[in-house]
Structure formats: structure tokens, C-alpha cells
Image: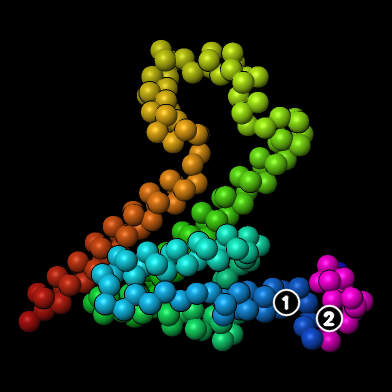
Amino acid sequence: MRRVAKELGVVPMTLYTYVPGKAELLDLMLDAAYARMPRTDTTGQPWRQRVTAIAEENKALFERHPWAAAVSTVRPPLGPGQMSKYEHELSGLDGLGLSDVEMDDCLTHLLTFVQACARAVAVAVADARAAQHDSALNDQQWRELNAPLLARVPDENAYPTAVRVGAAAGAAHSSAYDPDHVYAFGLQRVLDAFAALIDRSSDAKTSTP
């Protein structure tokens, strides 16, 4: 609240004329961000493309506003931005044979996955900055300095599977953790789970006399 007041050039107590506190201010900020989100027109596209577009829109939101990933939406703001976003995103799951509750479940699961990825990236970035500040070394310099130790720790005899898989993953991603790969891999698994649910709903309706 003090930071917002400083930006506006007013004393902090002035803000309480408009909002009761920080939680309400964050709700207004989040709803405003939702209202400004680009809405991709996926009319007529296959459902996987529609759902992927929803995920990408939310991923872009968190990239523009990293703070939004840390805001709890257990109690959504229910403003015009939120309602417009919800209506738009549900359209990507409509007409697939899912019940209304299943549509909401799928959307909640998708958005939770995207938010979790955004939070993981935010934590990784913060940790990397802190580590570099504390050690005065970037990741590359740290790896070079600790190369002798890193070469001794992975004992192929003691940890054969870990060494083999770790080496393969590290070579594939050029890193111990690749957030873009984690997101892309996870999104495909989410879509696969939705496909199974959609197929089951379709089979149930077909078998109903």
C-alpha cells in the first residue's frame, strides 16, 4: 500500500478511502489485468488448439505480470475482467460432451498447472539472483568452479539409473531444469488427460439407450 501511495504521490491512508486493504487492492489489480488480456479467436479450431490457446494466454499474463502468479484465486475477484475471462475460456471446452462441472474442473486444472509453472519460474529466477548475489558467481562460473566435485558425486556404481537418466536429461535440455520444456511437456499431459475424459463422456452418451 505504501508503494502504491508513493507512486500516486499521496499518503498511504488516502488509499483506504477507495479500498479496505491490500487484499482488495490485489483483487482490483488482478481483475484489471484479466480485462486487458488478449482473447484469441479459436472459433472452429480443434479443442486441443482452443485449450492450448487458453494456456498460452495465461502464461503470457504471468510473464507480463509475475506478481499475479502469487495471488490466490481461491476466492476469485468476480469483477468484469474475471467474468469475461471465464466466459471466454469456457468456450474452449464447450460442445465436447463434458458436463458443466467437468468443464469447470478441466479449466481449473489447466489454469492451476499454468500458474504452478509460472510460480516455479519466479522462484527459480529469484533463487538464481540470490545465489549469484551471495556467491558473486553466475551459473556457468559456479559449474566451472565445482566441476571436480560434480564429476565425483555421480557414482555410476552406486546410482546407475540416476546417473544415466540425469545425464540424458541434462544433455537433452542443456540444463538441470528447463522451464519451457517443463511447461510444454506438462501441457501435453494435461491435454491427454482431457482427451481421456472427453472420450469417456462420449462413450457413456453413445451407450445410453
Left or right, 79 with reference to 54: right
Overall secondary structure of the magenta section = helix
On residue 190, the disc is none
Question: Residue, x 71% and y 29% (percent of image)?
Answer: 137
* Residue 40 horizontal/vertical position (percent): 42, 74
From the image, tell me which residue sits under label 2.
Answer: 15
Q: How is the image coloured?
A: rainbow
Residue 195, image quadrant: bottom left
Q: Residues under labels 2 and 1: Cα distance?
A: 9 Å
**Is 65 on the left or on the right of 134, as rendered?**
left
Q: Earlier in the sequence, mark 2 or mark 1?
A: 2
Residue occupying the point 28% across, 70% down:
47
x, y percent for residue 24: 71, 78
Which image quadrant for residue 98? Answer: bottom left
Say whether residue 48 is left or right of residue 59. left
Q: Name the residue carrying label 1.
A: 25
Q: Which residues are magenta?
A: 3-17
Asked if labels 1 and 2 touch by Cβ distance under 8 angstroms, the answer is yes
- Quadrant, the N terminus: bottom right
Q: In the rendered image, which quarter is residue 196 located in? A: bottom left
